[in-house]
Amino acid sequence: MSKVRIGIDVGGTYTDAVAIDNDTYKIIGKKKIPTTHSDKEGVAKGIIIILKELMDENSLKPEDITFIAHGTTQATNALLEGDVANVGILAMSTGVDKRNAKKESNIENIELAKNKFLNINHIFIDSKDLTEAAINKKIEELSLLGSEVIVATETYSVENPKNELKVMDAANKKGLYATGGHEISEL
């Protein structure tokens, strides 16, 4: 058998897979299963299931596969449907930049679709007061406000992300996903 390429698409309702001949691009097999949103392993479980079933039904062995491509519309669908986590912004700055940083990081909820919002909570802390205890207290406050993910942002963090990394680490230790402005803004 010639080599096979497999494409998998995880959609909001179904996960689809197709196997094609690597040389002729002829379709060897197709499969569709419901997307496994509620499985404890999430949609990854569906990818494993569909890949195994596609291979079994078409007598494909791992050594036959030369390429696997994966795509998803889930992020786009989540935004359009408003199926997103509440965001907690922990903003930091000090000195002359403090006032602008506090104001600019305090954004309003974002309407994603009609009556569907990305809900945002905001807390500010002066960078000179940034201790482990203070970080944990602010993250707890954001959690009590309903924040499910944390965004750490500090003036000039692209040049020195140390404080954002401290916040991200503290959030992760509490079981919260976190990102920092330096990750989004870096060149």
Image (cartoon, grey):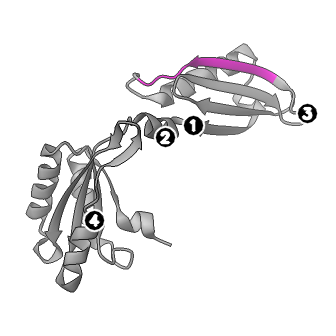
User: Badge 3: how crowded within 10 Å, few (<14), some, or many (20+)?
Assistant: few
Q: Does 77 appear in magenta?
A: no
Q: Earlier in the sequence, mark 3 or mark 1?
A: 3
Quadrant hosting residue 60: top right
Quadrant hosting residue 34: top right
Q: Among all residues in the image, which is located at the extreme bottom?
A: 96
Residue receiving disc 2 = 75
Q: Among all residues in the image, which is located at the extreme front?
A: 114
User: Badge 1: how crowded within 10 Å, few (<14), some, or many (20+)?
Assistant: few
What secondary structure is marked by label 4?
loop
Circle 4: residue type: Ser
Residue 104 drawn at (x, y percent) = 28, 69
What secondary structure is marked by label 3?
loop
Main SS of the magenta part reads: strand
Disc number at residue 72? 1
What secondary structure is marked by label 1?
strand
Disc 3 and disc 4 in contact, CB within 8 angstroms: no
Q: In the picture shown, does residue 135 fall above or below 80?
A: below
Quarter that holds the N terminus: top right
User: Badge 2: how crowded within 10 Å, few (<14), some, or many (20+)?
Assistant: few
Query: Going by the image, does 85 lie left or right of 130?
Result: right
> Label 1 to label 2, Cα distance in Å?
7 Å
Numbered disc in front, either 3 or 1: 1
Disc number at residue 105? 4
Circle 3: residue type: Thr
Residue receiving disc 3 = 24
Q: Residue at x 10, y 73 (%)?
A: 129
Q: Earlier in the sequence, mark 4 or mark 2?
A: 2
Quadrant hosting residue 95: bottom left
Numbered disc in front, either 1 or 4: 4
Q: Which residues are magenta?
A: 28-37
